[in-house]
Image (tube, rainbow, N blue to C red):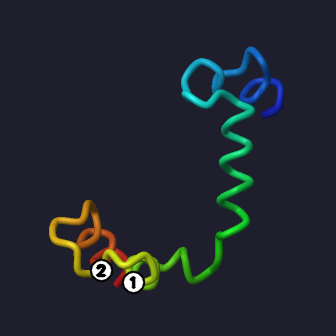
Amino acid sequence: RGRTQLISANGIFKRVVSTGGDGLLILAQREYKVLTYRSLQPHYDFSDRGVSQLPNYFYREHSLMLWE
């Protein structure tokens, strides 16, 4: 059902996502290759990406408060 209604040539992703359904699948496959349990933990994710000390980094403080 998802393939016919979401990512097909006439699916909703074709209309609302700039990459379309095909592009969305490519992006998801690329991200899945680098996804780890560690990358899902905000503290480690920010540290690994080198943004822990950046001033005014969007959502960092909020996500860390929620994670604790």
Q: Is residue 54 left or right of residue 48?
A: left
The amino acid beneath tag 1 is Ser
Q: Marks 2 and 1, how far apart in space?
A: 5 Å
Q: Position of residue 34 (x, y in %)?
A: 66, 69
Q: N-terminal of the two: label 2 or label 1?
A: 1
Q: Position of residue 23 (x, y in %)?
A: 68, 36
59 above or below 27?
below
The amino acid beneath tag 2 is Ser
Q: Is residue 25 left or right of residue 68?
A: right
Tell me the tag on residue 55.
Answer: none
7 above or below 40?
above
Disc 1: CA contacts within 10 A as few (<14), some (14-19) or many (>=20): few
| Residue at figure coordinates x 34%, y 85% from the top left | 68
Tell me the tag on residue 47.
Answer: 1
Q: Is residue 65 left or right of residue 15?
A: left
Q: Are marks 2 and 1 in contact (CB under 8 Å)?
A: yes
Identify the element where label 1 is drawn. helix
